[in-house]
Image: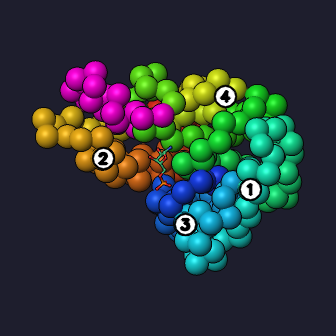
């Protein structure tokens, strides 16, 4: 059986990336071909390398806000890895429409809120400030608009009276580790029916 190739982009510790890698075994229709970061020191790169996955890094800082030139470098190792699917997993750079268009329909992102609520940053604090009873995470297809695009899955947590942004983030992150692998498996099989976890 020929596996779909998955490239994963991250900026931090990569716990979602690890959950995705750990899921791609046995009869899973996909395997990772590359893990990339905009930060060569990202903990996620070391975890991927320790699992025998090819890694690459393109530091965004020398490009000083010139997104197009940064992305021209970022895309080189990505294209070389010939991914069928690109997973953003805590990748903290906003991508231009030109870049996203090249992977339209095969690029996924995980966002720590129940989209369309709380696009952007500080999602857990915003959910608490709003007094929401429920919060969670979303996996969606990436389109040119930030944290937009068709929703492929959501997982919900109850907001507790004693919650702080950090406590809430930790509970949501556990759900992310369940949701993203479940969506990726289904997506790699060509099924875009949204998954709902609670
Ligand atoms: C996750 O909360 C993800 O939803 C957000 O960034 C965080 C990445 O965490 N976009 P990790 O690097 O996967 O541990």
Indicate which disc residue 43 carries: 3
Describe residue 123's horizontal placement relative to residue 147 as left or right: left
Which image quadrant is residue 42 in?
Answer: bottom right
Label 1 sits on a secondary structure element that is loop
Dot placed on the residue nearer the N-terminal end, 3 or 2: 3
Please name the residue that numbered disc 4 is placed on: 143
Label 4 sits on a secondary structure element that is loop
Cα–Cα span, label 3 and label 1: 14 Å
Indicate which disc residue 166 carries: 2
Describe residue 18's horizontal placement relative to residue 34 as left or right: left
Dot placed on the residue nearer the N-terminal end, 3 or 4: 3
Rendered view: 14 above or below 26: above
Cα–Cα span, label 1 and label 4: 23 Å
Cα–Cα span, label 3 and label 4: 27 Å
Q: Which of marks 1 and 4 is in front?
A: 1
Residue 162 within the magenta-colored segment of the rendering: no
Residue 177 horizontal/vertical position (percent): 41, 53
Q: Which of marks 3 and 4 is in front?
A: 3
**Which stretch appears magenta?**
121-137
- In this view of the protein, can residue 70 be seen by the observer? yes
Q: Do the residues labelled 3 and 2 touch (CB within 8 Å)?
A: no
- The response on whether ligand 1 sits within 8 Å of label 3 is yes
Please name the residue that numbered disc 1 is placed on: 59
Q: Do the residues labelled 4 and 2 touch (CB within 8 Å)?
A: no
Rendered view: 69 above or below 19: above
Rendered view: 10 above or below 161: below
Q: Do the residues labelled 3 and 4 touch (CB within 8 Å)?
A: no
């Amino acid at each position: 059986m020929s596996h779909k190739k998955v490239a994963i982009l991250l900026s931090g510790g990569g716990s979602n990336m690890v959950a995705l890698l750990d899921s791609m075994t046995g009869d899973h229709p996909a395997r990772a071909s590359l893990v990339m970061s905009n930060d060569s020191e990202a903990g996620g790169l070391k975890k991927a390398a320790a699992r025998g996955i090819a890694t690459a890094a393109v530091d965004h800082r020398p490009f000083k806000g010139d997104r197009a030139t940064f992305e021209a470098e970022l895309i080189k190792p990505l294209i070389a890895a010939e991914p069928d699917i690109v997973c953003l997993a805590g990748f903290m750079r906003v991508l231009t429409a030109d870049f996203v268009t090249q992977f339209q329909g095969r690029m996924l992102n995980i966002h720590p809120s129940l989209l369309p609520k709380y696009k952007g940053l500080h999602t857990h604090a915003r959910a608490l400030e709003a007094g929401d009873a429920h919060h969670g995470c979303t996996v969606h297809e990436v389109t040119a608009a930030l944290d937009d695009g068709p929703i492929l899955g959501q997982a919900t947590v109850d907001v507790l009276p004693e919650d702080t942004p950090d406590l809430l983030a930790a509970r949501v992150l556990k759900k992310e580790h369940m949701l993203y692998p479940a969506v990726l498996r289904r997506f790699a099989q060509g099924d875009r029916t949204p998954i709902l976890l609670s």
